[in-house]
Amino acid sequence: MKRLSQIVLVLMAAVMLVGCTGGNEVAEQGDSVQIAKDGSISSTLVSVLDQSYYDADELKLMIETEISEVNTTQGEGAVTLDDYKCDSAGNVKVKIKYVNSDAYTAFNGGTFYSGDAVTAKEIYGLDGNFVDVTDGKITTEDAVISEDAKIVVLSQNTNVVVPGKIVAITDNVEITGKKSASVSLKSEEDLAYIAYK
């Protein structure tokens, strides 16, 4: 299992411990990462809290504590709790903001990069089977990633929204719209790539 932050593990544990059916589907459908034009990132985690094991206030305190710990190394305000909701049925929705990819990775672990194609190529090599995307639809042509493209590289299954049109993806990414995609990795070592302009 990929190394995740302590708070994400707690949320996932809450999902696994939940007694009602469909808890995992809720989490898989709702988790998302949104990248803004300025490079900041928002993540939304959706889970079902088994209230016999966890208290909503206790979970919120754990999240705030984890954020505070990350901010001691990344700088004040690098990670912020933007929204926390827990209803009477135990449905939890947490929205966290990050100033950049480094803050996101420090909080969540794993691999996450959002930036220009030149830097992505230096770090990750951009090896993989990229397919071309035109107007939100996959074509049969192999994609060529131009130097002016932006790229997201990540090692987690989640929905991703980017601030431009997606132009290329690897085969472990499914297009869900012109600016959105869903990542489905087959192993912990895999990376997903999403290029956009």
Image: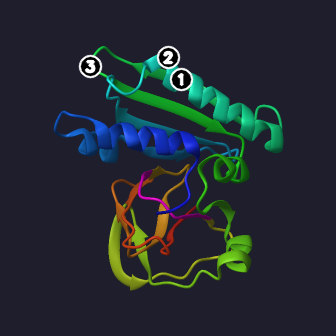
Q: Nearer the viewer, residue 168 or 75?
A: 75
Q: Which residue is mark 3?
A: 89
> How many marks are shown on the rendered structure?
3
Give neighbour class at mark 3: few <14, some 14-19, many 20+ (Cα, 10 Å).
Answer: few
Q: Alpha-carbon distance for marks 3 and 1? A: 16 Å
Q: Which residue is mark 2?
A: 57
Q: Amino acid at mark 2?
A: Asp
Q: Alpha-carbon distance for marks 2 and 3? A: 14 Å
Give neighbour class at mark 2: few <14, some 14-19, many 20+ (Cα, 10 Å).
Answer: few
For the magenta stretch, what is the residue range? 151-159
What residue lies at 70% left-to-right and 44% top-to-bottom? 38
Instruction: Decide if residue 53 is on the left or right side of residue 194.
Output: left
| Residue lying furthest top | 88
Q: Of label 3 and label 1, which has the lower sequence position?
A: 1
Q: Alpha-carbon distance for marks 2 and 1? A: 5 Å
Q: Amino acid at mark 1?
A: Lys
Callout 1: SS: helix
What residue lies at 67% left-to-right and 43% top-to-bottom? 40
Q: Position of residue 11 (x, y in %)?
A: 44, 38
Give neighbour class at mark 1: few <14, some 14-19, many 20+ (Cα, 10 Å).
Answer: some
Whether tag 2 and tag 1 are in contact, CB under 8 A, the answer is: yes
Q: Position of residue 192 (x, y in %)?
A: 48, 69
The quarter of the rendered structure image containing the C terminus is bottom right
Per the rendering, the mark at residue 60 is 1
What residue lies at 74% left-to-right and 71% top-to-bottom? 119
In this rendering, the answer to whether 93 lies above or below 23 is above
Q: Would residue 99 be counted in the magenta stretch?
A: no
In this rendering, the answer to whether 135 lies above or below 119 is above
Callout 3: SS: loop
